[in-house]
Amino acid sequence: MNDPSFRPSARPPRPTFAEMFTPKLVSVLREGYDAAAFRADAIAGLTVAIVALPLSMAIAIACGLSPDRGLYTAIIGGFLISALGGSRFQIGGPAGAFIVLIATIVERHGYDGLVLATMMAGALMMIVGFFRLGTYIKYIPFPVIVGFTTGIAVIIFASQIKELLGLDIAKEPAAFLPKLATIWSALPSLKPATMLVAALAIGIILVLRRLRPTWPGMLIAVVVGALASTLLAKFGHEVATIGSRFGGVPSGLPAPEFPALNLAKMRAVLPDALAIALLGSIESLLSAVVADGMSGRRHRSNCELVAQGVGNIASVVFGGVPVTGTIARTATNVRSGARGPVSGMLHAVYILAFMLIAAPLASYIPLAALGGVLAVVSWNMAEKHEFAALLRASPGDALVLLATFLLTVFEDLTLGIAVGVTLGAFLFLHRMAEAVEIEGGGTLLAEDVADHAQGTHPVYAGMPETDRDVMVYAIRGAFFFGATATIVSTLDRMGQLPRAFIFDFSAVPLADTTAAKSLEAFALKLRKNGTRFFIAGAIPSVRRTLVTAGLREPDVSYTASVADARASMKVASRAG
């Protein structure tokens, strides 16, 4: 146990609390923030606000709420996420990914239930951030992300069919299959004028994206749609607008209002709070990673989660909905030349200015145009190429992808993510176990083969002809619980035991306690037989795990290499 090779691996010092949770706004100001940087942020913020304005209203309406709640979210949540977050370029606001979840919560618990669930989710995100657990959210498998994102895109499009066709539906179910059944029964009520406005909006967005990609296609589509619906109304073809359905948009922010705290209600909305926290964390960190890739900067994930938590709580206190980092708006911010978080703060100020000055104009916006905006958003959101590539990649990835996608669409978003992550974890463990090998013995989880193929395997070379008193086994790969049963059964089938057994751990990068514990019985068996047990070449972290699990001297001797273990045996033989 006094082997000098047994030393903890050197680790860089952990950042201090202040370093981890200092907002990027403070970092940017410390670096030096001049008038040129402010001008760049002002222009970028205006560009993002033009994109966010119609989207925020459209998303709120798609959630079954009034459009002003989307604007409150972009103003309050967007400002705080930029001011307090760990990303230089993150733009916070209502996100299409939340439409399904919010609509379901509102249908089950009402808006008050949504407020309570979102405040609980905000608190959870802050706790996760302060305990520095944000890094683990990045471990969600890629097939799960593609599966639930594409599933959400399908549901968003389904939710807009009513607006695109002008169907008369008093109450649209949130669940997918009942929604489709309701839409089918309402098809006789479709309105050609509404369909014309929706097609016009979609066409403008797609054409401008191809011919003038720098123009605000969505805002232009909404403005042209409003003009078209006004003209159609002159000829007796009414098209539903924000004014006709919601009575317009308020010209300011509401007073803050806290929900009544009720323990029974908190228990009822806890699953929804967990779903909001999980989805918000995933979306915001994905958005921050996209911004990092575009800008060459790095975000602080835990600081970002704390800001997301604060933003969510404040958003619903001021009448909004759950807020998160939005990939499309964040990417627009970076492309527009933003220098730091001030652009995101100004984007919120610009939207507030719209509410204060031009809110009456929002009454003329046709819901069909906003439905067209979300139809394009859902098409862009669907990971079409990635979905097809994963289906072809491997059966395991395809299973995770389809399970997440189908459960998200037909059952529940939270269930889809949970099942996808679980299947992904088992798939990873299986692949890790397959990668573990015993030198000369092949993979531990070998597939069944025909009898005639057995002769093709090489004879195990771990027991040299010149030294039958020493047996050497070498493990390659992670020594963890997934490979434990097969390793133990392999050792139990060794037959006659030698005078010395050497376990070469030099190619083992990690070990867990379950696997280490499984060797205790084998060590006892060797000791009863009078066989010396050596573990050679274990790195400090692996050796520490083995020792903690009970593999200590005199039952086990640790050496730096197999050669050292052989030398130790020779010395013992001469002494004997």
Image (tube, grey):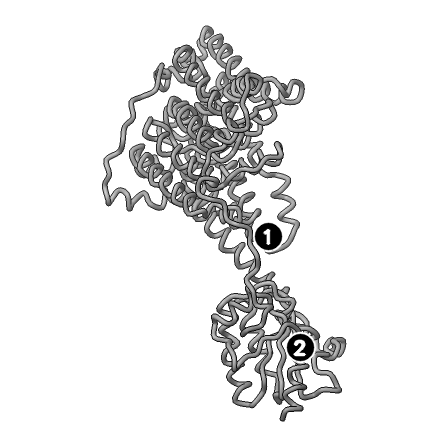
Q: Amino acid at mark 2?
A: Asp
Q: Secondary structure at mark 2?
A: helix
**What is the x, y in percent for residue 522?**
53, 81
Nearest the eye: 228 or 394: 394
Q: Quadrant of residue 430?
A: bottom right
The C terminus: image quadrant = bottom right
- Determine the CA span between mark 2 and mark 1: 44 Å
Helix, strand or loop under label 1: helix
Task: Name the residue that disc number 2 marks.
Answer: 564
The percent position of residue 343, horizontal first and vertical second, equals: 51, 23
| Residue 44, quarter of picture | top right
Image quarter of the N terminus: bottom right
Q: Residue at x 44, y 32 (%)?
A: 84
Counting residues from the N terminus, which is met first, the one under dot 2 or under dot 1? 1
The amino acid at mark 1 is: Asp
> Which circle marks residue 461 in the picture?
none
| Residue that mark 1 sits on | 397
Residue occupying the far top of the picture:
234
From this viewpoint, is residue 11 visible?
Answer: yes
Q: Position of residue 29 (x, y in %)?
A: 50, 26
Residue shown at the point (24%, 45%) measured from the top left: 264
Q: Is residue 193 left or right of residue 3?
A: left
Q: Position of residue 395 (x, y in %)?
A: 61, 55
Q: Is residue 461 left or right of residue 266?
A: right
